[in-house]
Image: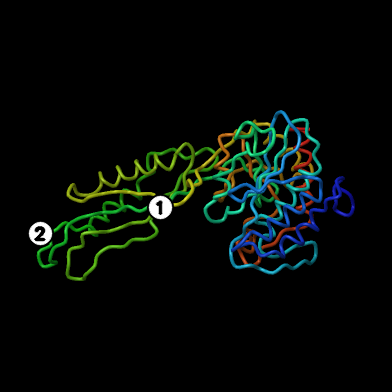
Amino acid sequence: MNASGADSDGFDPIAFLDSAVRIDSHADVTEMRSFLVDTLAAHGHDPTVDDAGNTLATKGSGSPHVVLNTHIDTVSPHVPYERDDGIIRGRGSCDAKGPLAALLSAFFATDPDGRLTLAVTPDEEVYSTGAAALDLTVLPGVDADTADAYIVGEPTGLDVCTAAKGRFEGTVALSGTNAHAAEPESGVNAVAAAEGALAAIRGFDADRDPHPDLGPATLTPTVIEGGDATNQVPADCAITVDRRSVPPESAAGFRDALETAVADAVPDDVGVTFDLTERPTPFLEAFATDADEPVVRHLSAAAERVTDGAGGAVRPFTAATEASYFAPAPTVVFGPGVLADDEGPVAHADREYVRVADVERAATALSDALDALVG
Protein backbone atom coordinates (compact mmCIF):
# COMPACT_ATOMS: atom_id res chain seq x y z
CA MET A 1 0.00 0.00 0.00
CA ASN A 2 1.49 3.34 -1.03
CA ALA A 3 1.54 6.68 0.76
CA SER A 4 -1.87 7.65 -0.62
CA GLY A 5 -3.46 4.57 0.91
CA ALA A 6 -4.03 2.92 -2.48
CA ASP A 7 -2.72 -0.57 -3.18
CA SER A 8 -0.78 -1.63 -6.26
CA ASP A 9 -4.07 -2.15 -8.12
CA GLY A 10 -4.98 1.50 -7.54
CA PHE A 11 -7.75 0.71 -5.05
CA ASP A 12 -7.91 3.06 -2.07
CA PRO A 13 -9.70 1.31 0.81
CA ILE A 14 -10.10 4.54 2.77
CA ALA A 15 -11.74 6.39 -0.11
CA PHE A 16 -14.05 3.37 -0.56
CA LEU A 17 -14.89 3.41 3.14
CA ASP A 18 -15.53 7.15 3.12
CA SER A 19 -18.18 6.62 0.47
CA ALA A 20 -19.58 3.38 1.90
CA VAL A 21 -20.31 4.78 5.37
CA ARG A 22 -22.33 7.60 3.82
CA ILE A 23 -24.68 5.02 2.22
CA ASP A 24 -27.66 4.09 4.39
CA SER A 25 -27.94 0.28 4.24
CA HIS A 26 -29.93 -0.83 7.28
CA ALA A 27 -33.36 -1.08 5.65
CA ASP A 28 -32.33 -1.66 2.03
CA VAL A 29 -28.88 -2.69 0.77
CA THR A 30 -29.59 -1.96 -2.90
CA GLU A 31 -27.53 1.25 -3.10
CA MET A 32 -24.64 -0.23 -1.14
CA ARG A 33 -24.61 -3.38 -3.25
CA SER A 34 -24.60 -1.31 -6.44
CA PHE A 35 -21.64 0.65 -5.11
CA LEU A 36 -19.80 -2.60 -4.39
CA VAL A 37 -20.63 -4.07 -7.80
CA ASP A 38 -19.48 -0.89 -9.54
CA THR A 39 -16.24 -0.91 -7.55
CA LEU A 40 -15.51 -4.50 -8.54
CA ALA A 41 -16.28 -3.76 -12.18
CA ALA A 42 -14.04 -0.68 -12.13
CA HIS A 43 -11.16 -2.90 -11.07
CA GLY A 44 -11.60 -5.43 -13.85
CA HIS A 45 -13.94 -7.97 -12.25
CA ASP A 46 -17.32 -9.23 -13.41
CA PRO A 47 -19.23 -9.79 -10.18
CA THR A 48 -22.22 -12.09 -9.81
CA VAL A 49 -25.27 -11.20 -7.72
CA ASP A 50 -27.07 -14.45 -6.94
CA ASP A 51 -30.75 -15.01 -6.19
CA ALA A 52 -30.17 -14.43 -2.46
CA GLY A 53 -28.54 -11.06 -3.08
CA ASN A 54 -24.96 -12.17 -2.42
CA THR A 55 -22.26 -10.33 -4.37
CA LEU A 56 -19.55 -12.72 -5.57
CA ALA A 57 -16.32 -12.33 -7.50
CA THR A 58 -13.54 -14.84 -8.01
CA LYS A 59 -10.02 -14.96 -9.39
CA GLY A 60 -7.47 -17.69 -9.98
CA SER A 61 -8.16 -21.41 -10.25
CA GLY A 62 -7.25 -24.65 -8.57
CA SER A 63 -6.59 -25.04 -4.88
CA PRO A 64 -6.55 -24.04 -2.20
CA HIS A 65 -9.74 -22.03 -2.47
CA VAL A 66 -10.05 -19.21 0.09
CA VAL A 67 -13.26 -17.19 0.54
CA LEU A 68 -13.33 -13.64 1.90
CA ASN A 69 -16.73 -12.93 3.42
CA THR A 70 -18.47 -10.04 5.15
CA HIS A 71 -21.79 -8.20 4.95
CA ILE A 72 -23.13 -4.87 3.66
CA ASP A 73 -26.22 -4.49 5.84
CA THR A 74 -26.14 -2.54 9.10
CA VAL A 75 -28.39 -2.16 12.12
CA SER A 76 -30.74 0.80 12.45
CA PRO A 77 -30.79 3.71 12.71
CA HIS A 78 -28.37 5.20 10.21
CA VAL A 79 -25.63 7.27 11.91
CA PRO A 80 -24.17 9.99 9.65
CA TYR A 81 -20.58 9.92 8.42
CA GLU A 82 -17.90 12.02 10.12
CA ARG A 83 -14.12 12.00 9.80
CA ASP A 84 -11.54 13.60 12.09
CA ASP A 85 -8.12 12.84 13.54
CA GLY A 86 -7.67 9.63 11.58
CA ILE A 87 -11.06 8.23 12.64
CA ILE A 88 -14.09 7.50 10.46
CA ARG A 89 -17.38 7.57 12.36
CA GLY A 90 -20.85 6.47 11.32
CA ARG A 91 -23.08 3.44 11.00
CA GLY A 92 -21.20 0.56 9.42
CA SER A 93 -17.77 2.11 9.86
CA CYS A 94 -16.59 -0.92 11.83
CA ASP A 95 -19.52 -3.31 11.37
CA ALA A 96 -18.74 -4.18 8.71
CA LYS A 97 -17.79 -1.66 6.00
CA GLY A 98 -14.33 -1.14 7.49
CA PRO A 99 -13.62 -4.89 7.27
CA LEU A 100 -15.15 -4.89 3.76
CA ALA A 101 -12.75 -2.16 2.63
CA ALA A 102 -9.80 -4.19 3.93
CA LEU A 103 -11.04 -7.41 2.32
CA LEU A 104 -11.57 -5.66 -1.01
CA SER A 105 -8.06 -4.22 -0.90
CA ALA A 106 -6.58 -7.66 -0.28
CA PHE A 107 -8.77 -9.24 -2.96
CA PHE A 108 -7.60 -6.75 -5.58
CA ALA A 109 -3.95 -6.96 -4.52
CA THR A 110 -3.64 -10.77 -4.53
CA ASP A 111 -2.55 -12.67 -7.64
CA PRO A 112 -3.43 -16.22 -6.62
CA ASP A 113 -2.04 -19.51 -7.84
CA GLY A 114 -5.03 -21.06 -6.10
CA ARG A 115 -8.50 -19.50 -6.09
CA LEU A 116 -9.65 -16.45 -4.15
CA THR A 117 -13.35 -15.56 -3.88
CA LEU A 118 -15.09 -12.53 -2.43
CA ALA A 119 -18.59 -13.31 -1.10
CA VAL A 120 -20.45 -10.37 0.42
CA THR A 121 -23.83 -11.04 2.00
CA PRO A 122 -26.90 -8.76 2.33
CA ASP A 123 -28.66 -9.81 5.56
CA GLU A 124 -26.21 -10.75 8.33
CA GLU A 125 -27.77 -8.54 10.97
CA VAL A 126 -31.23 -10.18 10.81
CA TYR A 127 -31.62 -13.70 9.38
CA SER A 128 -28.43 -14.29 7.37
CA THR A 129 -30.48 -15.26 4.35
CA GLY A 130 -27.55 -14.57 2.02
CA ALA A 131 -25.01 -16.71 3.85
CA ALA A 132 -27.50 -19.52 4.38
CA ALA A 133 -28.11 -19.70 0.61
CA LEU A 134 -24.50 -19.12 -0.48
CA ASP A 135 -23.54 -21.56 -3.24
CA LEU A 136 -20.04 -21.12 -4.62
CA THR A 137 -20.83 -23.29 -7.65
CA VAL A 138 -22.64 -20.36 -9.28
CA LEU A 139 -19.14 -19.06 -10.05
CA PRO A 140 -17.42 -20.15 -13.26
CA GLY A 141 -14.98 -22.99 -12.73
CA VAL A 142 -16.08 -23.72 -9.16
CA ASP A 143 -17.37 -27.27 -8.66
CA ALA A 144 -17.35 -27.57 -4.85
CA ASP A 145 -19.96 -25.71 -2.80
CA THR A 146 -17.51 -25.17 0.07
CA ALA A 147 -14.01 -23.68 0.11
CA ASP A 148 -10.81 -24.78 1.84
CA ALA A 149 -10.80 -21.79 4.21
CA TYR A 150 -12.89 -18.72 5.03
CA ILE A 151 -11.95 -15.30 6.40
CA VAL A 152 -14.98 -13.45 7.76
CA GLY A 153 -14.68 -9.69 8.12
CA GLU A 154 -15.88 -8.34 11.47
CA PRO A 155 -14.42 -5.88 14.01
CA THR A 156 -11.88 -7.92 16.01
CA GLY A 157 -9.26 -5.27 16.81
CA LEU A 158 -6.97 -7.04 14.29
CA ASP A 159 -6.96 -10.22 16.36
CA VAL A 160 -7.65 -13.55 14.68
CA CYS A 161 -10.79 -15.11 16.12
CA THR A 162 -11.08 -18.85 15.68
CA ALA A 163 -14.25 -19.62 17.62
CA ALA A 164 -17.58 -18.14 18.63
CA LYS A 165 -20.60 -19.21 20.59
CA GLY A 166 -23.85 -19.93 18.78
CA ARG A 167 -27.20 -18.42 19.61
CA PHE A 168 -30.47 -20.32 19.83
CA GLU A 169 -33.85 -19.15 21.06
CA GLY A 170 -36.98 -21.05 21.92
CA THR A 171 -40.01 -21.30 24.19
CA VAL A 172 -40.83 -23.90 26.83
CA ALA A 173 -44.60 -24.42 26.89
CA LEU A 174 -46.13 -25.83 30.08
CA SER A 175 -49.74 -27.05 29.90
CA GLY A 176 -52.13 -27.91 32.72
CA THR A 177 -55.87 -27.69 33.41
CA ASN A 178 -57.98 -24.62 34.27
CA ALA A 179 -59.91 -24.67 37.54
CA HIS A 180 -61.45 -22.29 40.03
CA ALA A 181 -58.80 -20.78 42.30
CA ALA A 182 -61.02 -21.59 45.29
CA GLU A 183 -60.34 -25.29 44.61
CA PRO A 184 -56.83 -25.32 43.12
CA GLU A 185 -56.39 -29.06 43.63
CA SER A 186 -59.05 -29.71 40.97
CA GLY A 187 -56.84 -28.25 38.26
CA VAL A 188 -53.22 -28.47 37.10
CA ASN A 189 -51.37 -25.19 37.64
CA ALA A 190 -48.98 -24.50 34.75
CA VAL A 191 -47.64 -21.30 36.34
CA ALA A 192 -46.75 -23.18 39.53
CA ALA A 193 -44.93 -25.74 37.37
CA ALA A 194 -42.70 -22.93 36.14
CA GLU A 195 -40.83 -23.23 39.46
CA GLY A 196 -39.53 -26.65 38.47
CA ALA A 197 -38.95 -25.60 34.87
CA LEU A 198 -36.82 -22.63 35.94
CA ALA A 199 -34.83 -24.85 38.27
CA ALA A 200 -34.14 -27.19 35.35
CA ILE A 201 -33.05 -24.23 33.21
CA ARG A 202 -30.70 -22.97 35.95
CA GLY A 203 -29.11 -26.38 36.37
CA PHE A 204 -29.08 -27.39 32.72
CA ASP A 205 -25.31 -27.02 32.30
CA ALA A 206 -24.25 -28.12 35.78
CA ASP A 207 -22.58 -31.31 34.54
CA ARG A 208 -21.26 -29.93 31.25
CA ASP A 209 -17.59 -29.08 30.84
CA PRO A 210 -16.77 -25.57 29.57
CA HIS A 211 -15.28 -25.27 26.10
CA PRO A 212 -11.48 -24.78 26.27
CA ASP A 213 -11.66 -21.54 24.25
CA LEU A 214 -15.23 -20.27 24.62
CA GLY A 215 -15.87 -21.18 28.24
CA PRO A 216 -19.26 -22.39 29.46
CA ALA A 217 -22.48 -22.26 27.49
CA THR A 218 -25.20 -20.05 28.95
CA LEU A 219 -28.96 -20.54 29.17
CA THR A 220 -31.02 -17.53 30.22
CA PRO A 221 -34.79 -17.29 30.72
CA THR A 222 -35.80 -13.96 29.19
CA VAL A 223 -39.63 -13.82 28.97
CA ILE A 224 -42.34 -15.59 30.97
CA GLU A 225 -46.09 -15.49 30.32
CA GLY A 226 -48.99 -17.36 31.88
CA GLY A 227 -52.50 -17.17 33.20
CA ASP A 228 -55.65 -15.40 31.97
CA ALA A 229 -57.59 -14.51 35.12
CA THR A 230 -56.68 -13.67 38.69
CA ASN A 231 -59.18 -16.15 40.15
CA GLN A 232 -58.41 -19.09 37.90
CA VAL A 233 -55.83 -21.89 38.04
CA PRO A 234 -53.79 -21.23 34.88
CA ALA A 235 -53.62 -23.94 32.26
CA ASP A 236 -50.73 -22.47 30.29
CA CYS A 237 -47.33 -20.93 30.93
CA ALA A 238 -44.56 -20.10 28.44
CA ILE A 239 -40.89 -19.42 29.19
CA THR A 240 -38.66 -18.04 26.44
CA VAL A 241 -34.96 -18.81 26.75
CA ASP A 242 -31.77 -17.50 25.15
CA ARG A 243 -29.04 -20.08 24.56
CA ARG A 244 -25.38 -19.23 23.86
CA SER A 245 -23.96 -22.56 22.80
CA VAL A 246 -20.48 -24.04 22.53
CA PRO A 247 -19.29 -26.89 20.30
CA PRO A 248 -20.33 -29.59 19.70
CA GLU A 249 -23.92 -28.68 20.65
CA SER A 250 -26.38 -28.34 17.79
CA ALA A 251 -29.74 -26.58 17.78
CA ALA A 252 -31.59 -29.90 17.44
CA GLY A 253 -29.58 -31.53 20.22
CA PHE A 254 -30.21 -28.59 22.55
CA ARG A 255 -33.95 -28.68 21.83
CA ASP A 256 -34.26 -32.35 22.73
CA ALA A 257 -32.07 -32.11 25.82
CA LEU A 258 -33.85 -29.11 27.32
CA GLU A 259 -37.31 -30.54 26.72
CA THR A 260 -36.29 -33.73 28.53
CA ALA A 261 -34.71 -31.81 31.43
CA VAL A 262 -37.82 -29.68 31.99
CA ALA A 263 -40.19 -32.64 31.68
CA ASP A 264 -38.20 -34.46 34.36
CA ALA A 265 -38.41 -31.44 36.69
CA VAL A 266 -42.18 -30.73 36.66
CA PRO A 267 -45.12 -32.82 37.90
CA ASP A 268 -46.16 -35.72 35.69
CA ASP A 269 -49.56 -34.16 34.92
CA VAL A 270 -47.97 -31.06 33.38
CA GLY A 271 -47.40 -31.20 29.64
CA VAL A 272 -44.05 -29.96 28.36
CA THR A 273 -42.93 -28.99 24.87
CA PHE A 274 -39.92 -26.94 23.82
CA ASP A 275 -39.82 -25.44 20.34
CA LEU A 276 -37.09 -23.36 18.80
CA THR A 277 -38.23 -19.99 17.49
CA GLU A 278 -39.21 -20.21 13.85
CA ARG A 279 -36.90 -18.41 11.43
CA PRO A 280 -36.27 -18.70 7.68
CA THR A 281 -32.64 -19.76 8.10
CA PRO A 282 -30.73 -22.09 10.43
CA PHE A 283 -29.62 -20.72 13.78
CA LEU A 284 -26.03 -19.49 14.00
CA GLU A 285 -24.34 -22.41 15.73
CA ALA A 286 -21.05 -22.38 17.60
CA PHE A 287 -17.85 -23.04 15.67
CA ALA A 288 -14.18 -23.60 16.49
CA THR A 289 -11.15 -23.75 14.18
CA ASP A 290 -7.86 -25.35 15.22
CA ALA A 291 -5.11 -22.80 15.83
CA ASP A 292 -2.71 -24.90 13.74
CA GLU A 293 -4.71 -24.37 10.54
CA PRO A 294 -2.71 -22.42 7.89
CA VAL A 295 -5.33 -19.66 7.66
CA VAL A 296 -4.90 -19.03 11.40
CA ARG A 297 -1.11 -19.19 11.44
CA HIS A 298 -0.53 -16.97 8.40
CA LEU A 299 -3.11 -14.34 9.29
CA SER A 300 -2.02 -14.17 12.93
CA ALA A 301 1.64 -13.74 11.97
CA ALA A 302 0.78 -11.06 9.40
CA ALA A 303 -1.44 -9.13 11.83
CA GLU A 304 1.25 -9.29 14.50
CA ARG A 305 3.80 -7.87 12.06
CA VAL A 306 1.71 -4.94 10.87
CA THR A 307 0.69 -3.96 14.41
CA ASP A 308 4.13 -4.44 16.03
CA GLY A 309 2.62 -7.09 18.27
CA ALA A 310 -0.50 -5.16 19.30
CA GLY A 311 -2.74 -7.40 17.19
CA GLY A 312 -2.74 -10.91 15.86
CA ALA A 313 -3.77 -12.66 19.06
CA VAL A 314 -5.66 -15.90 18.49
CA ARG A 315 -8.85 -15.77 20.54
CA PRO A 316 -12.61 -16.33 20.42
CA PHE A 317 -15.04 -13.79 18.97
CA THR A 318 -17.66 -12.62 21.45
CA ALA A 319 -20.60 -12.25 19.03
CA ALA A 320 -22.40 -14.72 16.78
CA THR A 321 -21.48 -14.43 13.10
CA GLU A 322 -22.16 -16.03 9.74
CA ALA A 323 -18.85 -17.84 10.20
CA SER A 324 -20.86 -20.69 11.72
CA TYR A 325 -22.40 -21.40 8.31
CA PHE A 326 -18.95 -22.01 6.81
CA ALA A 327 -17.56 -24.31 9.50
CA PRO A 328 -16.36 -27.04 9.79
CA ALA A 329 -14.11 -25.70 7.02
CA PRO A 330 -11.28 -23.75 8.68
CA THR A 331 -12.83 -20.36 9.39
CA VAL A 332 -11.56 -17.23 11.14
CA VAL A 333 -13.06 -13.84 11.95
CA PHE A 334 -10.81 -10.81 11.43
CA GLY A 335 -10.97 -7.10 10.79
CA PRO A 336 -10.37 -3.53 11.93
CA GLY A 337 -12.50 -1.88 14.58
CA VAL A 338 -13.83 -3.16 17.90
CA LEU A 339 -17.18 -4.23 19.29
CA ALA A 340 -16.55 -2.11 22.39
CA ASP A 341 -13.80 0.04 23.90
CA ASP A 342 -13.00 1.44 27.33
CA GLU A 343 -15.82 3.98 27.01
CA GLY A 344 -18.52 1.47 26.06
CA PRO A 345 -20.20 -0.06 23.00
CA VAL A 346 -18.85 0.81 19.54
CA ALA A 347 -20.43 -1.55 17.00
CA HIS A 348 -24.23 -1.13 16.82
CA ALA A 349 -23.86 2.06 18.91
CA ASP A 350 -24.33 5.72 18.03
CA ARG A 351 -20.59 6.29 18.52
CA GLU A 352 -19.55 3.63 16.00
CA TYR A 353 -16.12 4.32 14.53
CA VAL A 354 -13.01 2.76 12.99
CA ARG A 355 -9.44 4.03 12.86
CA VAL A 356 -8.10 4.70 9.36
CA ALA A 357 -4.72 3.23 10.27
CA ASP A 358 -6.37 0.00 11.40
CA VAL A 359 -8.20 -0.41 8.10
CA GLU A 360 -4.90 0.02 6.27
CA ARG A 361 -3.13 -2.42 8.61
CA ALA A 362 -5.91 -4.96 8.16
CA ALA A 363 -5.63 -4.68 4.37
CA THR A 364 -1.87 -5.25 4.52
CA ALA A 365 -2.18 -8.19 6.91
CA LEU A 366 -4.83 -9.82 4.73
CA SER A 367 -2.74 -9.34 1.59
CA ASP A 368 0.33 -10.84 3.24
CA ALA A 369 -1.62 -13.80 4.60
CA LEU A 370 -3.29 -14.47 1.25
CA ASP A 371 0.06 -14.39 -0.53
CA ALA A 372 1.14 -17.22 1.78
CA LEU A 373 -2.14 -19.12 1.46
CA VAL A 374 -2.99 -18.89 -2.24
CA GLY A 375 -0.23 -16.80 -3.85
- Left or right for 240, reference 19: left
Amino acid bearing label 1: Thr
**Residue in the foreground of this view, choosing between 180 and 133:** 133
Hey, what amino acid is under mark 2?
A: Ser
- 77 over 112 or under it: above or below: below
Judge whether residue 308 can be spotted in this image.
no
Q: Which of 352 and 67 is in front in this view?
A: 67
Query: How would you rate the neighbour count of disc 2 (Cα within 10 Å): few for under 14, some for 14-19, many for 20 or more?
Result: few
Q: Position of residue 187 (x, y in %)?
A: 13, 58
- The local secondary structure at tag 1 comes to loop
Q: Mark 1 points at which residue?
A: 277
Q: In which quarter of the image is residue 125?
A: bottom right
Q: Where is residue 140 in the image (x, y as percent from the top left)?
A: 69, 36
Which is nearer the N-term, disc 1 or disc 2?
A: 2
Which residue is at 59% across, 43% downward? 134
Residue 224 at least partly seen:
yes
At a point 34% along the width and 45% down the height, the residue shown is: 258
Left or right side of 285 for 260: left
Residue of label 2:
186
